[in-house]
Image (spheres, helix red, strand yellow):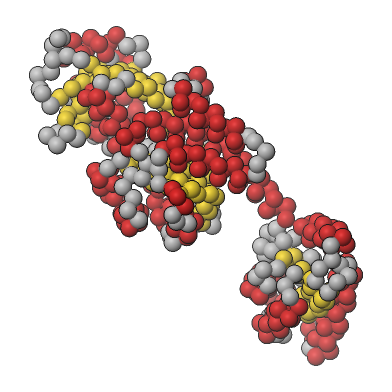
Amino acid sequence: MEKLTYEYLKGISNLSPIACAILSVQKKPDGRCGEIRFFAINDVFKRNYYDLFAENEAGDKPGFDDFEKTIEGMLYTAHLPKEPNFEDICFRCAWGGEFINTYVDTTKMYGFWTQDIMYPIVGESDRPDIRYCSFNYTLNKEMDTGKFATVSPDIASFVIKACLELRGDNDFETSMQKVCGDIREFSDGYACSILTIDKDFRTFNVICGDVRNHELDIKKVFSEFPYEIVESWEYVLAETNIIIIKDANDMNFIETKAPEWVKTLRDYNVESLCLVPFIHRKEILGYLYITNFDVEHFSRVKDTLELVTFFLTAEVANHLFLERLEYLSNVDMLTGVYNRNCMNINVDELSLKLEFNPKPFSVAFCDLNGLKTVNDNGGHDTGDKLLVYAAEVLKEVFTDDKIFRAGGDEFTIISFSPKFEFEEKIKLLREKACDPEWLYFAIGYYHDEDTGNLRLAMRYADEEMYKDKDKFYKKYPDKRR
């Protein structure tokens, strides 16, 4: 057996045409991974490392020729953050004899896609607790599809199946639910869910979830999570492309970074976890979240998730884009209720449906009294605040109905609530909006029991609203526009 001297291992590193470091990997008495050091490096690795880190050295910047001496023998964490996933593959390679080839998106951390090629080095070491592996890597500014596609047949088969499901005829939520369930089964996890986040509004949304034997409602579980916990994931992911918890040691490490999150994991008896971000244009759009997966097949699960998440990200990004377009085209940006364009489309569709299938409905027109006076006295900013407040009151009252901003100071409500319920809502609205110096609605409504003529009902409601407005200005003539 070859004696693994420094000279021998240095020669191996110099045979590589790409960046190469021979790593010494310690095995602790309890069988876990210990220290990982750069034992020998080639010139390509030295140049890359020098360009990345030499300028940050304390004191004078070391020369390139001397820099090699400061790297060899150094712990890998001297400049790089501690990375449990990296330590795991080093340990499996050096001590488990595994050949490892991974290609991952590290653009968020380093600005590159990274291919890591690792193989064990067999030989006689001076220390029984040390073994060696060769760590080689390449960097790409853009994704190299050829490298990305080099996976085992079972992983390729699963990813192709997921892609076909995502490109099928089902709607977005149905397709994502199916893929979510397939991922849970593939990883043999207890639960799998897909979430999106909105950093502007500091909210997150569980798109879908799948739990073994349907033992719990995953959306209900996440409803108890404050946004701050989801926000902490990005901090933990700042120095890695995937969070994987395999055992108590990994859990303890993550706890140092996100203690509140780990507390929830312990509360729900989570012992293993995969968290993969959906990164689009260097921004996190959401996450794939898997708990209590099969850690015995950690490498297979990790490689699969990294690949399938690439395609899930594209679907999520497209969905959010279309959702945003729909929002912008249908929602009034000032008040947050539906806009006139949306009302016109809804009225057209509902009129046709009610014509062929009449059923009871109600319509209300609510027009702000005295908005011009508010604008004249307080300026248009004050008037905008009144409009926003008016919309909030309407949303509080008509919780299950559609609310439209039909014009500058006019709102329309279309409701399928029972007549008595709708009239109770109108009564409540009058109580909430009766301040002549601020919020006071002129209200007109009409209930149609069986004709199905929506446009006629809207005309009647509009006429009643103007009658109510006349009463207001007779009582408060100084408010008349």
Quarter placement of the N terminus: top left
Q: Give the farthest residue toward the bottom.
A: 475
Quadrant (top left, top right, bottom left, bottom right) of the C terminus? bottom right
The image position of residue 468, as x and y in percent, is 82, 83
Left or right: 341, with 244 as reference point: right
Give coordinates of residue 42: x percent, y percent: 28, 15
Q: Quadrant of residue 120?
A: top left
When the figure is inspected, residue 205 is found, relative to residue 169, above or below; the finding is below
* 141 relative position to 94: left or right: right
Vertical position of residue 162 compared to residue 284: above or below? above
Residue 290: percent from left, percent from top: 42, 44
Given residues 418 and 323, the one toward you in this image is 418
| Position of 453 relative to 298 (above/below) | below
- Residue placed most toward the observer, 233 or 140: 233
Q: Residue furthest front?
A: 213
* Left or right: residue 359 compared with residue 106: right
Q: Residue at x 35, y 11 (%)?
A: 17
